[in-house]
Image: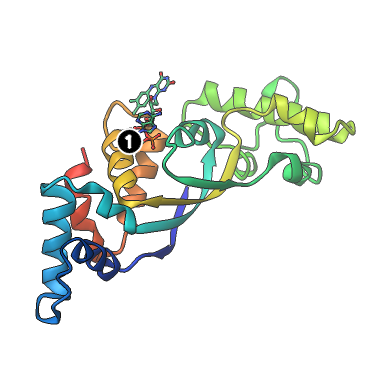
Amino acid sequence: MKVELLQHTSLTVCAKAIRTCWDSHDKSDCGGEKDLELIDRVGNKHKHASTLEHLSYTFYISGVSRALLQELARHRIASLSVKSTRYTLKELKDEKAFNTTLNVRVDFERAAKYIVLTKVDSVDRASINALENLRLILIDGIANDKAKYCLPESYKTELTWSINARSLQNFLSLRTSKSALWEIRDLANMVFDNLPSEHKYLFSDSLE
Ligand SMILES: Cc1cc2nc3c(=O)[nH]c(=O)nc-3n(C[C@H](O)[C@H](O)[C@H](O)COP(=O)(O)OP(=O)(O)OC[C@H]3O[C@@H](n4cnc5c(N)ncnc54)[C@H](O)[C@@H]3O)c2cc1C
């Protein structure tokens, strides 16, 4: 899995939005540490959390499974643009077989380009079988629109994901928890790691 932060809003935008409420834009009170303290006090401690919605982050996320995607998509207060299997499944057509009959030889390394492996041998072999079945269906000339119905949940995808700071706090608190699926927990930790260092203090209480 890879996570790249593509863009983020400057903290000064959020601080300016907060100062709008009291019309207190006096320059001597603005900038640096004063902005950090203001955002934390109003947005977090005073629970005026809508002010945190002025901060947004856009990430490019790749190498995650569709199992993870369907959990990530449940977070409604975020925007996703996802690689379409309808348009991209042809990528499998140029591949050679991923396994031999009865799974005597299995090419885990090449399969890992397309599916997320779990390190549980029986699960990964079953996943590669599904991948190979899909490849054969595509070579048979079945349209992507129909072939996509036999994709394994482990099939890799990528997406651009935008989320504001308020919703990201909620996402991190739910998905860094030990009760979350391991893969989305890894993603949540990587998203936190990729935040601009000066923003991390807003999220440290959201981590489990
Ligand atoms: C450990 C774990 C197990 C889970 N298991 C399941 C499962 O078995 N089955 C399943 O279906 N889902 C499951 N989920 C998904 C979960 O139910 C949520 O859909 C998901 O975590 C998104 O959370 P959210 O609604 O807070 O986020 P968002 O959709 O981003 O919403 C953010 C916040 O906005 C507010 N909000 C958004 N929409 C509404 C609304 N319509 N009405 C009122 N307030 C709203 C809420 O305050 C919400 O917390 C699981 C999640 C976790 C973390």
Q: So how many labels did they put on this image? A: 1
Q: Is residue 129 left or right of residue 162?
A: right
- The answer to whether residue 104 of the structure is visible from this angle is no
Give the image quarter of residue 202: bottom left
Q: Residue furthest bottom?
A: 28
Residue at 20% over, 60% down: 21
- Kindly give the residue lying farthest to the front in the view shown: 23
- Mark 1: secondary structure: helix
Specify whether 99 is left or right of 59.
right
Q: Nearer the viewer, residue 155 or 13?
A: 13
For the question of whether residue 151 can be seen, the reply is yes
Residue 92 position (above or below residue 200): above
Residue under label 1: 175
Quick check: 83 above or below 38? above
Residue at the (17%, 74%) spot, across then down:
25
The image quadrant that residue 156 belongs to is top right
Instruction: Using residue 72 as the reference point, say whether residue 172 is left or right of it.
Output: left
Badge 1 amino acid: Arg
Q: Position of residue 65 (x, y in %)?
A: 54, 37
Q: Residue at x 12, y 71 (%)?
A: 33
Q: Name the quadrant of the C terminus.
A: top left
Ligand 1 within 8 Å of disc 1? The answer is yes
Q: Position of residue 106 (x, y in %)?
A: 65, 32
Q: Write down which quadrant ligand 1 falls in.
A: top left
Image coordinates of residue 131 in percent, x first then y, are: 69, 31
Q: Position of residue 170 (x, y in %)?
A: 29, 39
Front position in the image: 123 or 203? 203
Q: Is residue 126 above or below residue 70?
A: above
Q: Is residue 122 above or below residue 64?
A: above
**Residue at 22 percent of width and 50 percent of height:** 203
CA neighbours of label 1 inside 10 A, class few (<14), some (14 to 19), many (20+): many
